Structures are given as C-alpha cells and as structure tokens.
Amino acid sequence: MRIATWNVNSITARLPRLLAWLESSGTDVLCVQETKTTAEQFPTHELRELGYESAVNATGRWNGVAVVSRVGLEDIVRGLPGDPGYEGVEEPRAVSATCGPVRVCSVYVPNGREVDHPHYAYKLQWFEALRAAVADDAAGSRPFAVLGDYNVAPTDDDVFDRTLFEGSTHVTEPERAALAALRGTGLSDVVPRPLKYDHPFTYWDYRQLGFPKNRGMRIDLVYGNAPFAKAVTDSYVDREERKGKGASDHAPVVVDLDV
DNA sequence: ATGCCCAGAATGTCTGGA
C-alpha cells in the first residue's frame, strides 16, 4: 500500500497536478492539507472518477484537510476532540479515517506566526489536543499514523540554514517538545530518504529561488505507531512535484507499507 | 535546468503562509 501526505496550497489551484500525480504515483491513500475550499467546493466528483473517496474537513479560504482513499474510507472523524480553537473559532485542521488495514489522521498544525503572537500559544495548545486525541490509536495494534504539515522542523538539520531561523517559529524548543510528547504516545518519525541532496526537505518558499537553491525545510511529517513503522518498506519526498509552473510550495511525502 | 511568491476574495489590496 502506498500512502502519502501533501500540503497542496489550494486543492482548486492544484487539481490538474493532483489528479495527474495520484494516477502516476499509484497512491492509495493521500492525506491533504490546505485545501482552501469549503466542503462543497472540494473536488469530490473529480476524485471519485479516478476511483477515490474523500473525507473532507474544510470551511473556506483558510486551512482545510482531507483523506483521499481508493482502498476504503470508514469511521471518519472530522476535527480534533478538545480542539482549542483560535479566537473562539474551531478551524478545520484534522480529519481521521480508516483506509483498509490502516488508520490515518491528516493534520494541518497551526503556523504560530511569531513566538510572541497568540497564534504560537494556540499552536502549542493544538499540539496538546492532538497528543491526547491520538493516544489510544498510537498505542493500539492497528497500523496508525498522523500525517501532515506539522509546521515544525524536528531538528536543526531539517532547515537549510539554522542561523536564519534563530528566534523564529518552527524551530523552538517548546515546538520540538510538543513533537517529543507526541512521540511519547508510541509514535515515531518515519523519516523519508531524500531523492537529491542530503536532507529530505518537504517545503521550499516560492520566493528568491528557494527550490532551485534547495533552501528548504522538513516540516511535513509522518508519525507512525509501532505496527505502522514495522510495515514501512520505503519512504521518500517526491520533489519532482515541486518543479515547474503550478506547483505547491510543499512536495508530497510518500510511504510504502507492506500491510 | 528546478528559475527569482502564490492563493483567495475581490476588482484594489489585503491576509496568510513559514
């Protein structure tokens, strides 16, 4: 089984590339982030024509997540129990589903903006809600993974130049502690192999030749429980999808499983 | 070559992204 996660930065803008990539890559289950649509605008019908069902949690121009599967889609849970919300509004940042033998949770963790911004406190609160929400599945015997845009670089090697990130979100100790707490439920980081260069970056800024200069970050992560991790046969970043006109600023992370 | 922000809502110019 081939599972992937991809922050598409608008599923409407990305639809031609998304449909082509699903077919060419042979992906069975795709966790999507930043759909930037309402649920009604989500391309459910186009995906169904390719043989994929969709579980969508989306409300408009910001955020939005989905699980797209051609191997079954059951027990859909939209949102996160205990989601703290931002400025009184719960945002569409999580959706879970069971796809054949595997359960997945597609997440779009809040950005945080600046360390002294309320959005940063919200980010840490959201991580704690995620930890609590996935603890049972993480400890279970069924293969389970939380896949998505975590908006945290787990180590200094996961950014192209650590000195440029001092004082910024995505690299702070509390954010990395939140990742460690999540791993503490029984999840481990399924680190992909890079297809080029030394580090498996998953995001490159659109500006200033970020991608050609490989000024990237690894912030799209796959955290799998022990049965999931044991089944992994390969994992890589499909950086080809970051190339050319009409690309997202994130590349898909692909995981192959023997399940 | 992988190439010097993009998307959405809106129609001028913000917000958000990381």
Image (cartoon, coloured by chain):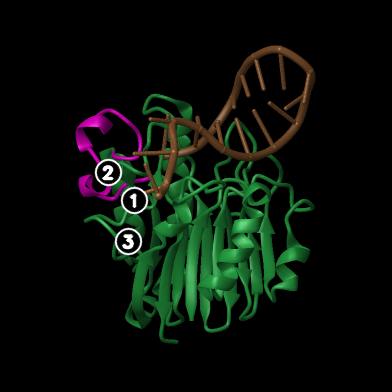
Chain colours: A green, B brown
Within 10 angstroms of label 1, few (less than 14), some, or many (20 or more) residues? Answer: many
Within 10 angstroms of label 2, few (less than 14), some, or many (20 or more) residues? Answer: many
Q: Which mark is residue A159?
A: 2
Disc number lying in front (3 or 1)? 1
Within 10 angstroms of label 3, few (less than 14), some, or many (20 or more) residues? Answer: some
* Pointer 2 or 1: first along the chain: 2
Q: Chain of mark 1?
A: A
Q: CA distance from mark 3 to mark 1?
A: 17 Å
Q: Chain of mark 2?
A: A
| Closer to the camera in the image, A43 or A212 | A212
Q: Residue A165: say if magenta.
A: yes
Please say if the residues under marks 2 and 1 sit with CB atoms less than 8 Å apart. yes
Q: Residue lying at the far bottom in this picture: please name it.
A: A259
Magenta-colored span: A152-171
Q: CA distance from mark 2 to mark 1?
A: 7 Å
Label 1 belongs to which residue? A218
Q: Is residue B9 above or below residue A98?
A: above
Q: Position of residue A194 (x, y in %)?
A: 29, 61
Label 3 belongs to which residue? A183
Q: Position of residue A227 (x, y in %)?
A: 38, 80
Q: Main secondary structure of the magenta part?
A: loop
Q: Is residue A84 above or below residue A44?
A: above
Q: In this rendering, do the residues under marks 3 and 1 share a single chain?
A: yes
Q: Residue A126: say if magenta.
A: no
Displayed quadrant of residue A169:
top left
* Pointer 2 or 3: first along the chain: 2
Q: Position of residue A36 (x, y in %)?
A: 65, 44
Which amino acid type is shown beneath numbered disc 2? Val
Quadrant position of the C terminus of chain A in the picture: bottom left
